[in-house]
Amino acid sequence: MIKVGIVGATGYTGAELLRLLAMHPEAQVTVITSRSEQGKPVSDLYPSLRGIIDLTFSLPDVDLLAQCDVVFFATPHGVAQGMVASILERGVKVIDLSADFRIRDVATWESWYGQTHGAPELIPQAVYGLPELNREAIASASLIACPGCYPTSVQLGFLPLMEASCIDLNDLIANSASGVSGAGRQASIGALHAEVSDSFKAYAASGHRHLPEIVQGLNDMAVSANGQANGQADTSVNLTFVPHLLPINRGIHSTLYANLTDLTVDVQELFEARYADEPFVDVLPAGSHPQTNSVRGSNMCRIAVHRPNGGAKVIVLVVEDNLTKGASGQGIQCMNIICGLAENAGLAAPALLP
Amino acid sequence: MIKVGIVGATGYTGAELLRLLAMHPEAQVTVITSRSEQGKPVSDLYPSLRGIIDLTFSLPDVDLLAQCDVVFFATPHGVAQGMVASILERGVKVIDLSADFRIRDVATWESWYGQTHGAPELIPQAVYGLPELNREAIASASLIACPGCYPTSVQLGFLPLMEASCIDLNDLIANSASGVSGAGRQASIGALHAEVSDSFKAYAASGHRHLPEIVQGLNDMAVSANGQANGQADTSVNLTFVPHLLPINRGIHSTLYANLTDLTVDVQELFEARYADEPFVDVLPAGSHPQTNSVRGSNMCRIAVHRPNGGAKVIVLVVEDNLTKGASGQGIQCMNIICGLAENAGLAAPALLP
Amino acid sequence: MIKVGIVGATGYTGAELLRLLAMHPEAQVTVITSRSEQGKPVSDLYPSLRGIIDLTFSLPDVDLLAQCDVVFFATPHGVAQGMVASILERGVKVIDLSADFRIRDVATWESWYGQTHGAPELIPQAVYGLPELNREAIASASLIACPGCYPTSVQLGFLPLMEASCIDLNDLIANSASGVSGAGRQASIGALHAEVSDSFKAYAASGHRHLPEIVQGLNDMAVSANGQANGQADTSVNLTFVPHLLPINRGIHSTLYANLTDLTVDVQELFEARYADEPFVDVLPAGSHPQTNSVRGSNMCRIAVHRPNGGAKVIVLVVEDNLTKGASGQGIQCMNIICGLAENAGLAAPALLP
Amino acid sequence: MIKVGIVGATGYTGAELLRLLAMHPEAQVTVITSRSEQGKPVSDLYPSLRGIIDLTFSLPDVDLLAQCDVVFFATPHGVAQGMVASILERGVKVIDLSADFRIRDVATWESWYGQTHGAPELIPQAVYGLPELNREAIASASLIACPGCYPTSVQLGFLPLMEASCIDLNDLIANSASGVSGAGRQASIGALHAEVSDSFKAYAASGHRHLPEIVQGLNDMAVSANGQANGQADTSVNLTFVPHLLPINRGIHSTLYANLTDLTVDVQELFEARYADEPFVDVLPAGSHPQTNSVRGSNMCRIAVHRPNGGAKVIVLVVEDNLTKGASGQGIQCMNIICGLAENAGLAAPALLP
């Protein structure tokens, strides 16, 4: 039984880890930490876990966490940076759900997140935790930087096209929409029911923190597809990314637009072939439109591809649960890979519909 | 591995059976039937089950269903009546989620459901599938009549008080509210998003089909508590039941009101003691207010008891998921009891929150 | 043109005053104040008012407010107490939407609100702003204490029965449910979309601040009906009040239960007769169930009465918009009465449905 | 007082006409027709109109409708075609909210709507009812073809850019999302609360009926901007249009993407200048993101323009209420223009927020 610790388990991604790990046959949560809720049983915050998870929040303590096999960080950005080194030293694997180790270029990270990075020396060893792209590297990693929720959907949607080098990299568009749990369990007027429900809006249209992460990922794919190991192509991808806020609790929907440079490609076949063996990517039949409730609470990502009138424009529709495949589920998928477990251990439950 | 058949698997309770049984370690769905969707894969109706349930709807056929160990009816009332006898004859256990066998008095059933009962001779052998009340009888039953969604919540909420004979039976009130999945997957204007969302209303305030079922159950409790085996007390319970329609998908909340006849009773202790060993009833600490999302997608029923200012009025707050503990989950709980499995097999997953 | 000032116009009741007064043919808002948002245009907080209300928040200042004919307080409780005297002195009418002057008994107020009352000497001159009960007193008042949102619905629902002295005052139940705007525009985890939506719960089942206000009102009705001017009947009403939180933005639904002491009463006729001339109370035909969206954004209160099987139990269903008839609309109705305008001036727009 | 008739007043656009016209100072609805609800008072279908609109549905009859000054068609496509000629003959103005007369090319209409057009001879005299584009033609028209809900938002969003000839017409993208009332008041499983709420999806990604309407409108703008009266440029606009279904009742949000061909354009200034005098188009300050609830129930369209990093990509965010500016409100705006009334008569009420 793998012993799991969770730092910052009071937020929604922490609660989602607890929910999923409660169903995991070979892992058990043994430590949960929270500065603000120390001493309180987790069921006080999440009554859904009453009788299922009997843990109490403790202060984050390295000695305590060192007794675990794997430690998850479900903290706001900036927290993991200060603790990860001491945990890794004790031989514990770390899976960080926050943004701290996702971006390789320190200056870029510092610019978008508005603070000095606290552990730049660890960045090179962090492996980007997108199994569909990095499965082998994840298996031998000690520090996993789990992708952001939007970046997961956008990268999985563009991946087959990028690998096939069949689209114009100079004009990619990701029009994404997320449920409100993406904003976390923070008291804020903007996330009130009375402000969010029965409404819809874009935000950060001129620039969102997930943009550099997505661009880095797409550039990697481009470089890899072009066999260019030197990274000179790094600036080649030109992505417009507009996130929107949905009046739903869970779910991300990304509508991706690209122009084919090779009109002979059968995009349906391309996607089906690429993801045939992936346990958590489901390519829908031609003509389909995935809906977010088909993945609510599940680790599945569902994708459909459209090419109106057989023209150059390809439209990719991607849905995922932002808390599951977009965060905690993906983190557990990485844990399973690291620990040599079945990749879908604890992640096989169907979505909740309706 | 127990082989399970589902008649009428196109509706929400059928889909919920499929979702829950997909997680069941010792049962497997082998037959699903639907007249209207014959030949269609279930994932066409429920994309959430793509890659998880690979079955195709077939026409309801007794020979096919006879190959199962257990057959569920997830049909509208009136359907099971016509098929159950022939299935029972083949030695197959039947668990009926519909209203066909819930009410013992045929005339009462026919009056509320507006049709002649098709199999009155089977009613005496049907066991009412509320495990907290009838566990032993369920274990040896061949035909289970699963309680309605509202009746489950109301009976579990009044049960400890009834057994303790400490309330005035002449004035009980159940003010209940249900999510819209309770109306089933039927095209109707009244269940449209534009009609239901951002709104709330009572309905059937002057009489609802679940009223006679609840009254029968409460009367049984009264008779049993009074040691009156002859049923003379049958008319003693006077219940006012007002259902309401909530703009949510899943969940029932019942607010129950009764007047204590014995002011010395510690109602908190009474409830905790009564349900201490029940796997699916959770009595919250004094002062709590359960919310429906704490049981969303789970088989748990959560209850809190209040007694304002220590007076005679006792208020019981009960939440359940109408599709799970209120229907399909309870049916599987009965199946587990009948088949001698762990009662929580396939039902242990936490609620989905948020 | 009546000049109107609004103190604390940043919250939802303040915004609702602005929305309604923008449609008022004979009143104009000239001053809005807010300590926290001073200098900011109202449209920054409420983009719905862009191009319609061009005012900027100023600091609350008596000289400024004294230039108005009427000043509304849309502030949390405790604020109006400190400012009302100086405004009344300048000959300005005050309509307080907060709880400061609703309860006549100072000790009761201080007990429920947990603070010392700042202006007990003003309480006797405050008129409770429920036009259906107090129209004449309102017309000549200088200080109006607008009823709370729940109390409006409960009192209007019981009023005809109280006046007819036909119910048992010893066991009244008000099972109410409110949309989330009732909690105001405050950042709080409990009002987040992810916590509230797709869920439902009771709260304050053992005691809510609106309880003493409702009881005072019902007692007044009882005393008046009994012709007892000395108030000796003040403790006669025994009310159980359980509020619930609805996952909707606007709307209150109260389900009221009482036992008839006179079974010969025609309750439908009683309600229709009582409210025949009321512009904002609509008694629905027998057998109806009002829904909250039928009054969304309107000042109408809709009521239906049920008496299952012609028995002693009478059920009253009441809906209102908590921000309109439950707060700001009722305040404007009072203003119209005070100023001698048509009572429905600015309040005639139909509800927004769907 | 202008006498108004409404054919097909049972649907949501019909109800919205009734709601708005109830507030109109110079128009009065005198006839409402419905084949299915003949003889029934409108308040039976729309309780929000109780006490406000006292009309009863009658059968559609030309003699009856001929007594009106203006007749609205709020019918599904295909209905107006059969009745408009006889009404126009009687000298009555017709405003058609359906799709019957929006598309000038009959073959295109017949191809997208799958039926033969019943009155192709009337198409040339129909004026497309987008006041911001066609105000003068509307003023003298007898037959108005009101724009579709999506087309209104997309055309208003692109209009200033088209007129300035500063974008690449070969690659326009409209990523739009609509509330569920856009599907009408029809019983359908796809519009059930349990299917729509807490979910999001694209639909018709490979082609939607509003596409040819939008393309026709954009082509007209292109031709006009280029001074090409011969229409040779008709095929120059290449638009990708993907609609999505939002779990809200009212509201459309369009996110538009185009590539600037002239990088020196100040897009903010361009939009502000173009719409400076428009009563129902509000250009938000730079950096803004309009939300649909800021126009809920109002005829206002709010627009923001973004140009990330000052690059070539211009993003236009547009919100409207699909039932108001996207249908009935725009129809009344056209009626006001035709009848020489103030353009905002009956349309001045602020949005309902929250």
Image (tube, coloured by chain):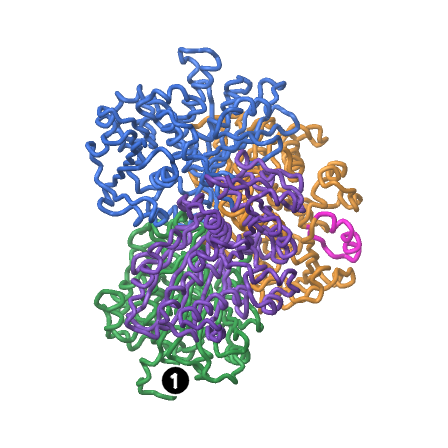
Chain colours: A blue, B purple, C green, D orange
User: Which image quarter is the C terminus of chain C in?
Assistant: bottom right
Q: Is residue B28 left or right of residue C199?
A: right
Badge 1 local density, few (<14 within 10 Å), some, or many (20+)? some
Kind of residue at badge 1: Ser
Q: Is residue B326 left or right of residue A13?
A: right
In magenta segment, residue D84: yes
The x, y position of residue D25, in whole percent, is 58, 63
User: Which image quarter is the N terminus of chain C in?
Assistant: bottom left
The x, y position of residue D299, in whole percent, is 55, 51
The x, y position of residue D160, in whole percent, is 55, 36
Q: Can residue C208 be seen at all in this image of the molecule?
A: no
The x, y position of residue C242, in whole percent, is 38, 66
Disc 1: which residue: C224
**Which residue corresponds to the image point at 55% horizontal and 69% vertical from the top-left?**
B207
What is the magenta range? Answer: D77-96
Q: Nearer the viewer, residue C124 or B142?
A: B142
In magenta segment, residue A209: no
Q: Is residue A189 above or below residue C143?
A: above
The subunit carrying tag 1 is C
**Which residue corresponds to the image point at 62% horizontal and 65% vertical from the top-left?**
D44
